[in-house]
Image (spheres, helix red, strand yellow):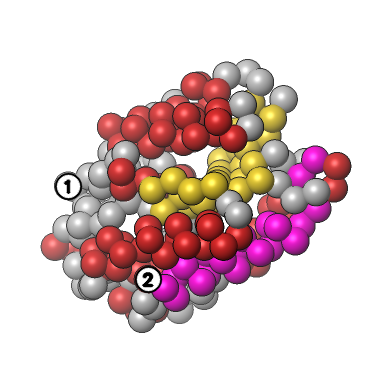
Amino acid sequence: MKTILCYGDSNTWGYIPGTGNRYPRQVRWTGVLQNLLGEKFHVIEEGLNGRTTVMDDPMRIAKNGQPYLRPCLDSHAPIDLVVLMLGTNDTKHRFGLSPFDISEGVAMLVNIIQQSATGLNNRAPAILLVSPVVLDPAPEKSALFEGAAQKSRELAGHIENVAKNTRCAFLDASLHARVSPTDGIHLDEEGHQALGHAIAEKIQHLVG
């Protein structure tokens, strides 16, 4: 059985736009992924609302994705593949980060994974970097995500460069899924289905 660790934010957790509740497992893209890959794969969900790449959020506790990553890897080892999809929360106005800065945070997380021995035979797991969907913040989210739409449009190219420089696989989520018009930040059920199918196809080529 191959182990796939999905490390992300609220769009991996399954946040329902407009309610804050969580989609059922079979609706979330990770559940769609598990169903498509079948019983020869074990898909582990590690989504957290508000998770950033490497930034401490002054308004929310324990959202930095860096400190937990290595213990998470150790906990679930041996891991065949890590699907890493972060960067959306880094576009928030309070952080003042450019798309390049955000991609540098992604690169730091890639380094942690590649320096770990949490794959098979004490090697590092393979990595699939997924750039997040493009944002279109609804009015009630516009202050929190001021400038985020443009940043999110530019982010994919920077994360793809990280993937090339670190020899990771890459997938641009925005080519397959769109945010819900309800809040312009999170995936709806259709988006989760589309992303799950896209990632499943990519994984089957990588480790299938």
Q: Is residue 48 left or right of residue 72?
A: left
Q: Which residue is mark 2?
A: 99
Q: Which residue is mark 1?
A: 181
Q: Main secondary structure of the magenta part?
A: helix
Which residue is pictured at 52% across the width and 62% down the height?
162
Image label count: 2
Which residue is pictured at 17% across the width and 47% down the height?
181
Residue most extreme to the right: 121
Asked whether residue 38 is drawn in magenta, I would say: no
Give whichever of discs 2 and 1 has the lower sequence position: 2
Which residue is pictured at 64% across the width and 41% down the height?
81
Which quarter of the rendering shows the N terminus? top right
Q: Give the image quarter of residue 88.
A: bottom left
Mark 2 Cα shell of 10 Å, populated few (<14), some (14-19), many (≥20): many
Q: Is residue 64 above or below residue 93?
A: above
Q: Position of residue 123 (x, y in %)?
A: 80, 49
Residue most extreme to the left: 139
Three-letter amino acid code at the position of disc 1:
Pro
Q: Position of residue 128 (x, y in %)?
A: 55, 46
Q: Is residue 20 visible?
A: no
- Write down the region rendered in magenta: 100-120
Residue in the foreground of this view, choosing between 165 and 64: 165
Q: Is residue 201 above or below residue 141?
A: above
Asked whether residue 109 is drawn in magenta, I would say: yes
Residue in the foreground of this view, choosing between 13 and 74: 74
